[in-house]
């Protein structure tokens, strides 16, 4: 079904996110979505992977023909793209709605385009993209999108785009975007490191398939924590089992010393959270984790 919300949607980029957006927003574009990218090979691959789109080697074509433009490029490339679009903006009277999909920034990096009279916003899908556009379009439906508009009208347009993708818009103030992005990275990126470290320790303990052993435990912990918050905590820190903590740190120091610092940091953070929640953990737990006295 074609919704015809926009005359034409343009997308700056040809990678995973760009392709998913092209497919997801295609029903809202009267003309086929138009993609620009620096790599002709990636553009050709995008056309093969997503039916019903068109590509161009000319970034100015998006400014001239599109009334909505999504910028889906690496964070470090954003400023250069904005500068190029701003230069193109001076050549045409059009004033499209433009948004980027970076998590770390709000609408501020698009200020040159806002100053040219464009509506500008940040729209960040809080999910990962693996290169399967149909699957990603399905997952965007119901996903949360962090939006930051440079104006009330821009925020309205951002919500409109999120709605077209079937998502749920969550407004993040400009000055809190870095905090928002840090929270996502802490929850998702650091989780990958945590699992990798735990799997390595299990290998050194003699476990042949450490991830298979971890999977049900970690999945249950994740599900419970999303459902119950910090109330899902279990284990020796909650029980106040000081000797177990001493044994853990000693074993790690002997067999996996690279993990000691991370284990201590997470254990101390857990004790801090327990205290924040009103519990009174045994002070001996902190002493057991102290670098000067943890290992007998």
Image: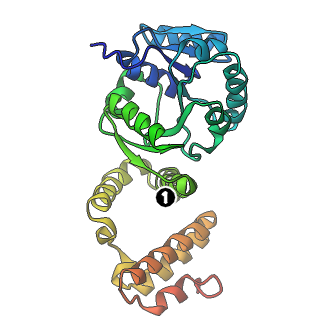
Q: Is residue 82 left or right of residue 296?
A: right
- Quarter the C terminus occupies: bottom right
Crowdedness near tag 1: few (<14), some (14–19) or many (≥20) residues, C-alpha within 10 Å: some
Can you tell which quarter of the image residue 94 is in?
A: top right
Which percent across, then down, holds residue 81? Answer: 68, 28
Q: Nearer the viewer, residue 3 or 35?
A: 3
Can you tell which quarter of the image residue 7 is in?
A: top left
Q: How is the image coloured?
A: rainbow
- Quarter the N terminus occupies: top left
Q: Secondary structure at mark 1?
A: helix
Say above or below: 213 vs 62.
Answer: below
Residue 36 in view: no
Which percent across, then down, holds residue 169? Answer: 37, 43
Can you tell which quarter of the image residue 74 is in?
A: top right
- Residue at image location 54% in from the left, 44% down from the top: 103
Which percent across, then down, holds residue 230? Answer: 34, 69
Q: Nearer the viewer, residue 182 or 146?
A: 146
Residue 115 in view: yes
Q: Is residue 251 left or right of residue 76?
A: left
Say above or below: 221 vs 154.
Answer: below
Q: Name the residue carrying label 1.
A: 198
- Residue at image location 45% in from the left, 38% down from the top: 153
Which percent across, then down, holds residue 78? Answer: 66, 34
Q: Report the number of numbered marks.
A: 1
Q: Nearer the viewer, residue 180 or 214?
A: 180
Q: Looking at the image, which residue sits at the far bottom?
A: 283
Say above or below: 153 vs 190.
Answer: above
- Residue at image location 47% in from the left, 80% down from the top: 272
- Residue at image location 58% in from the left, 64% down from the top: 259
């Amino acid at each position: 079904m074609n919704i015809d919300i926009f005359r034409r949607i343009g997308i700056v980029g040809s990678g995973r996110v760009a392709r998913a957006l092209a497919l997801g927003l295609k029903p809202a574009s009267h003309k086929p979505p138009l993609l620009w990218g620096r790599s002709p090979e990636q553009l050709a691959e995008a056309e093969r992977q997503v039916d019903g789109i068109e590509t161009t080697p000319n970034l100015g074509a998006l400014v001239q023909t599109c009334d909505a433009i999504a910028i889906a490029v690496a964070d470090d490339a954003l400023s250069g793209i904005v500068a190029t679009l701003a230069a193109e903006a001076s050549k045409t009277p059009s004033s499209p709605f433009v948004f980027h999909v970076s998590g770390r920034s709000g609408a501020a990096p698009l200020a040159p385009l806002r100053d040219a009279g464009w509506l500008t916003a940040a729209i960040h899908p809080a999910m990962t993209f693996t290169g399967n556009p149909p699957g990603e379009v399905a997952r965007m439906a119901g996903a949360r999108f962090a939006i930051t508009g440079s104006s009330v009208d821009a925020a309205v347009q951002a919500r409109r785009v999120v709605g077209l993708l079937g998502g749920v818009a969550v407004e993040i103030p400009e000055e809190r975007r870095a905090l928002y992005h840090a929270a996502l990275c802490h929850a998702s990126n650091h989780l990958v490191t945590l699992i990798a470290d735990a799997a390595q320790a299990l290998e050194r303990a003699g476990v042949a398939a450490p991830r298979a052993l971890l999977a049900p435990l970690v999945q249950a912990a994740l599900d419970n924590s999303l459902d119950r918050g910090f109330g899902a905590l279990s284990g020796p820190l909650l029980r106040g089992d000081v000797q177990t903590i001493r044994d853990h740190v000693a074993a790690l120091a002997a067999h996996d010393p690279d993990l000691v610092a991370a284990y201590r940091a997470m254990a101390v953070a857990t004790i801090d959270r327990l205290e924040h929640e009103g519990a009174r953990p045994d002070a001996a737990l902190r002493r057991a984790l102290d670098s000067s006295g943890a290992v007998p």
